[in-house]
Image (spheres, rainbow, N blue to C red):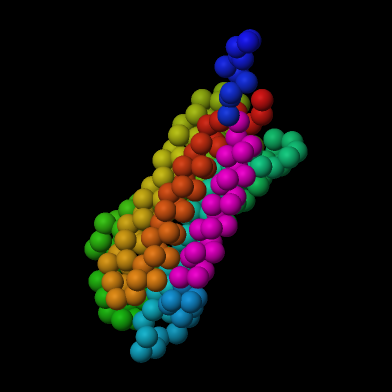
Amino acid sequence: MPVKSSASFRLTAVPVVVVAQLLAAAVLTLTLVWVLHFRGGVSWEMSSNRQPIYMAHPLFMVIGLIICTGEAIMAYRIILGPRGAKKAVHLLLHLVALAFAAVGLYAAFKFHHDYRLPDIRSLHAWLGITTVALYALQWLVAFVYFVFPGAVMTMRADYAPWHIFFGIVVFLMAVCTAETGLARFVFAVSRYPNEAFVVNFAGLAIVMFGVAVVLAAILPSRY
């Protein structure tokens, strides 16, 4: 019986991207169920119930720094067409992610300000602020190197591996930040086991989505 070449067992990014899309849908669905069903939705107004104004924070952060960022990283594997179109989608999705993150941060600071609570005291807050700051810096540097007309091709080639590396690092930091944030909610909902299950499954889905995104980024796009 002939032995197959090891190349025939090579995994490409295509099936991993498909799995990542399913996981992204799971993350979004679980987050929406948690925010809308268990926490009463999102509101920007002060009320006796503090949850609606604060729940805008995890909702927008998950959509922005997790889902949109993951899709931006996989854009070169998903978008069919010239490299310029892939780069434009990649850049735009990262910008959308930053916009969602800005709204999410605003919700957190507004909640703390309205109810006279201290800011940036937890590990989750420290990780979150650092992640958003590095994300914005990564986007600006990438814009200068890869979009700005004055950038030299040799500079782009030299920076490209570092751009990929730091992009993955920032994305994994976002995943870690999301996990620490969800953990804080789980500790506070011990009397609501159904909600805790939803939050825990959302956390698992975020981790698996992060793994799938990184794997899709490093695997070859085709056989």
Give residue 155's position: percent from left, percent from top: 54, 27
Does residue 115 show up?
Answer: yes
Residue nearest the observer in this picture, 24 or 138: 24
Q: Tell me what residue is drawn at x 45 percent, y 34 percent.
A: 165
Q: Tell me what residue is drawn at x 75 percent, y 38 percent.
A: 81
- In the image, 190: left or right of 58? left
In this rendering, the count of numbered labels is 0
Q: Is residue 29 magenta?
A: yes
Give residue 167's position: percent from left, percent from top: 47, 40
Does residue 148 show up?
Answer: no
- In the image, 82: left or right of 121? right
Residue nearest the observer in this picture, 192 or 31: 192
Q: Farthest residue toward the right? A: 81
Quadrant position of residue 45: bottom left
Q: Quadrant of the C terminus?
A: top right
Please say if 187 is above or below 221: below
Q: In which quarter of the image is the N terminus?
A: top right
Quadrant position of residue 179: bottom left
Give residue 162's position: percent from left, percent from top: 46, 31
Q: Farthest residue toward the top? A: 2
Q: Farthest residue toward the bottom? A: 48
Q: Tell me what residue is drawn at x 57 percent, y 17 percent.
A: 6
What range of the chain is rendered magenta? 12-34
Please say if 12 is above or below 129: above
Residue nearest the observer in this picture, 8 or 36: 8
Q: Is the magenta stretch mostly helix, strand or loop?
A: helix
Please say if 198 is above or below 73: below
Give residue 139's position: percent from left, percent from top: 51, 46
Q: Is residue 5 magenta?
A: no
